[in-house]
Amino acid sequence: MSVTVEERGKPNTQDYRVFFKNSEGKYISPFHDIPIYANEAQNIFHAVVEVPRWTNAKMEIATKDALNPLKQDVKKGNLRYVANVFPHRGYIWNYGAIPQTWEDPNHKDSDTGCCGDNDPIDICDIGNKVCSRGEVIKVKVLGTLALIDEGETDWKVIVINAEDPEAGDFNDIDDVRRIKPGYLEATVDWFKTYKVPDGKPENQFGFNGEFKDRDFAIKTVKSTHEFWKALVSKATSTGEYFCSNSFTARALNQGRINHMSRGRDL
């Protein structure tokens, strides 16, 4: 499967969008149309990179928009950027989401006691490559952190790009502690403090901020896949999410909007 990324509008504006196309040139949804699995037997998942490492613009899959393009989050009418909280600079991993997953806001997690955040499950890719915005990568799941963000369960799944030269050395969360000492501690610190410059309190965590292992993380990802299945089958009736094939791309081709395309292979 091949995916092409098409940018429309200018970065750092509220009109900027990143759309996705398949090998036939048809628009697809990164939320619904990219398969969750790259290799189900080996538990290798696809991930969509929303925010490349070291950048600050808070880009995300627009779950309520037709075709679910990437767009920059807006708060109080202003584009949202993550502050540099010393000693961190921007996002300290390639940050993104696993397609065909959903953290159900109506389901109270038995471990955290909080409901889901209404979005696909998030990933933090610790691989060496700095990815591109909209890049689709294959990832190995290593563990997960249970962030409690403003009263909502917001799992952060630690992964490594399966094509990273060192991917074979990483098989569980303890390998991250051994090979990249300090990275997990920095991750907890980043999520704890990244909203403080905006005047908000420090975030809290389930499990006292301890990372859960690979098996727990994979189970969590698969459970959010089941919630996604229920969503698209309308077992969960939010009325806010859409499969791209139910929409026409006609509006995307109207007007004179500059765009760039670049290829991605899954």
Image (tube, rainbow, N blue to C red):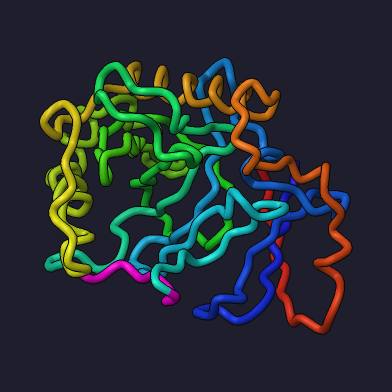
Seen at 71% across and 74% down, the residue is 260
User: Residue 150 appears at what percent x and percent y?
Assistant: 26, 46
Residue 179: which quarter of the image?
top left
Along the line of sight, which residue is nearer the eye, 227 or 180?
227
Residue 224, visible in the rendered structure: yes
Residue 38, visible in the rendered structure: no
Task: Say if 224 sits above or below 249 in the image.
Answer: above
Q: Is residue 163 left or right of residue 236?
A: left
Task: Tell me, yes or no, whether the highlighted magenta stretch contains residue 250.
Answer: no
Residue 246: which quarter of the image?
top right
Q: Is residue 64 left or right of residue 88?
A: right
Seen at 49% across and 44% down, the residue is 97
Which residues, given as a range, are shown in magenta? 77-84
Along the line of sight, which residue is nearer the eye, 24 or 242?
242
Seen at 64% across and 57% down, the residue is 69
Quadrant (top left/top right/bottom left/bottom right) for the C terminus: top right
Seen at 49% across and 20% down, the residue is 222
Residue 80: which quarter of the image?
bottom left
Quadrant (top left/top right/bottom left/bottom right) for the N terminus: top right
Along the line of sight, which residue is nearer the eye, 100 or 45?
100
User: Residue 61 appears at what percent x and percent y?
Assistant: 55, 53
User: Residue 86 appears at what percent x and percent y?
Assistant: 12, 68
Task: Say if 193 sits above or below 243 in the image.
Answer: below
User: Residue 39 appears at what percent x and percent y?
Assistant: 60, 25
Task: Say if 173 sits above or below 75 in the image.
Answer: above
